[in-house]
Amino acid sequence: MKLFVYHTPELTPTSTVPDCAIAIDVLRATSTIATALHAGAEAVEAFSDLDKLMQVSANWPADKRLRAGERGGAQVEGYDMGNSPLDCTPEKVTGRRLFISTTNGTRALQCIQAAPVVLAAALINRDAVVRYIMGQQPATIWTVGSGWEGSFSLEDTVCAGAIFAALLKATGATAGEMAGNDEAIAALALYHQWQDDLLGLMHHASHGQRLLRLNIHEDLKYCAQTDILDVVPIQKQPGVLAKN
Ligand code: MLT
């Protein structure tokens, strides 16, 4: 297995696909997707474009859908919810499809949707994703961070490093044997530096600070936890993720 880490959709190759591609948006789209599916959502359908989301979701029964829209960290007016994983309670999401559009995370999913296996990972479901990978043994794996409008995000890269660390532990391989690019080694080093204070790292992260300015403290605490959800969001058709 070779792991390639890409910090943003913009830095991700477009001329080829890996055997398994993993979108990461710790703050907060992939944390929300994992939480919604774990809480019983029928599926999550991701859109980079808000108008397209409205069009497609209009064909879905109103009592079986939830529209989640986020821009700049805040809920988009007219949507049922924003992008808080803490809103994804079983009472709210069970049996419903979550139609979601976020500033960066849904773009990351879109840029890898041609890969044969597409997963969504965050710190909260890292272990479940790693166990899935160990069962499948894909030869090439990409992690694609969402970043923020084209720029690097600490929280996405630390999650890529957390996945890498767990894969190394599970396989017994060395970092040199498994790393597909320099970014993978850098992500691992970032994780080793911050693994005992992931919430502290999120307080340094520019998007963490943006959310704190919006008084969204609880989401940071929730998203900084590791391995709390046994759920693997996997793409069933382009843009549609369900529980594996
Ligand atoms: C994004 O897609 O950029 C994020 O998920 C933003 C957020 O925190 O809602």
Image (spheres, rainbow, N blue to C red):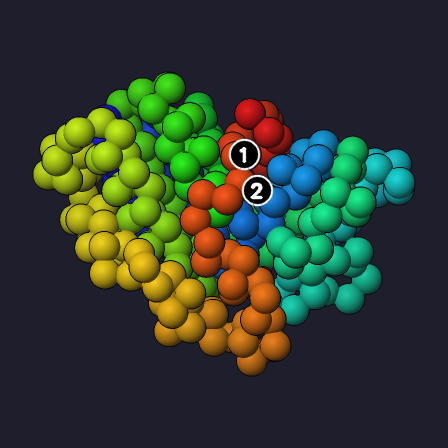
- Tell how many labels: 2
Q: Quadrant of the C terminus?
A: top right
| Contact flag, marks 2 and 1 (Cβ < 8 Å) | yes
* Disc assigned to residue 231: 1
Label 1 SS: loop
- The x and y percentages for residue 49 are 64, 52
- The x and y percentages for residue 73 are 59, 68
Residue 15 in the image: above or below residue 82: above
User: As shown in the figure, which amino acid type bears the numbered disc 1?
Assistant: Val
User: As shown in the figure, which amino acid type bears the numbered disc 2?
Assistant: Ala
Residue 71 in the image: above or below residue 96: below
Q: Is mark 1 within 8 Å of ligand 1?
A: no
Q: Residue at x 88, y 36 (%)?
A: 61
Q: Is mark 2 within 8 Å of ligand 1?
A: no
Q: Quadrant of the N terminus?
A: top left
Q: Quadrant of residue 239?
A: top right
**Structural crowding at the residue carrying mark 1, measured as other residues with C-alpha within 10 Å and reported as few (<14), some (14–19) or many (≥20):** many
- Identify the residue under disc 2: 34
- The mark nearer the N terminus, 2 or 1, is 2
**Residue 27 relative to residue 32: left or right:** left
Q: Nearer the viewer, residue 140 or 59?
A: 140
